[in-house]
Image (cartoon, rainbow, N blue to C red):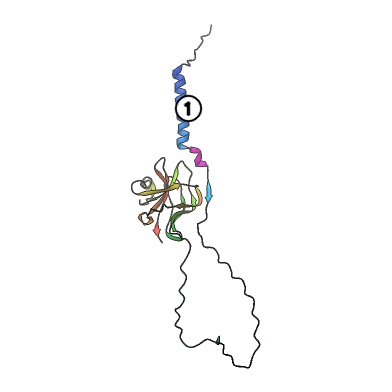
Amino acid sequence: MGRVRKVFTGPLVIAVLVVVVGGVGFGMYWFQPWKLWQDETVQEALPGGAAEPAAPPAAAPEPADEPSDEPSDEPSDEPSDEPSDEPPASPSPATGPQTLASGELITHEHATSGTVKLVRLDDGSHLVRLENLNTSNGPDLRVWLTDAPVKQGQAGWHVFDDGKYVSLGKLKGNKGSQNYALPRDVDPSAFSSVSIWCDRFDVSFGAAELGRA
């Protein structure tokens, strides 16, 4: 007669299975590995960009006056040789967004490229603009304005939370061109770099040094 094997299905095995399943679920939520294969492209225009001036409407031609032999008391349109007391017209001030500083993104933990610009708008507000961004997706990515130096290689992965920094919000997309407004009480001259920062694992995906324009 064959030997019958008993399968133990007591509370301990059930508890172990619950812990394993829970651990796998938490790990998937925490690391979100599927994001590494998911791209999100966000394209935003620069606010207040200068528009092409509209062409003025063509004026209707005025009827020509009949020539007259009589002298006229009307002032002549002929140019005068006498100097004018009128000051020369000053050029109108430049309008539209102004780039105060810019830099190129370098790779840190993930391959990253693109241009970062610090821009002042007509109303006096400031924003950080990412142009042609290309990086990896990931969990809890933020755009940080910091005073940390940008270093190549692993030496630069974790330095951006060592000093002063301002989070400008979650990264809108890992590809494209996007705008991130600075809070009104933030002095942009106190910062020198921008990092695409993974807040969950305290690591920089990529960063740019801001060189003054």
In the image, is residue 34 part of the stretch drawn in magenta?
yes
Taking the spot 47% from the left edge, 20% from the top edge, the residue there is: 14
In percent of width and height, residue 20 lies at: 46, 26
Residue reaching furthest to the top: 1
| Secondary structure of residue under mark 1 | helix
From this view, report whether residue 53 is shown above or below residue 163: below
Q: Nearer the viewer, residue 53 or 107?
A: 53
Relative to 196, is 95 above or below? below
Q: Is residue 34 left or right of residue 167?
A: right
Binning the other alpha carbons within 10 Å of mark 1 as few (below 14), some (14 to 19) or many (20 upward) gives: few
- Tell which of 143 and 16 is nearer to you: 143
Residue 42 placement (x, y as % from top left)? 53, 49
Tell me the residue at 53%/48% (across/down). 41
Residue 167: x and y in percent read: 41, 47
In this view, the residue in front, 177 or 1, is 177
Q: State the image quarter where residue 11 is shown.
A: top left
Q: Main secondary structure of the magenta part?
A: helix
Q: Which residue is mark 1?
A: 21
Image position, residue 4 (x, y; %): 51, 10
Query: Which amino acid, by three-letter code, is at mark 1?
Result: Val
Magenta segment: 32-37
Quadrant where the C terminus is found in the figure = bottom left
37 horizontally vs 63: left or right:
left
Q: Residue at x 37, y 57 (%)?
A: 189
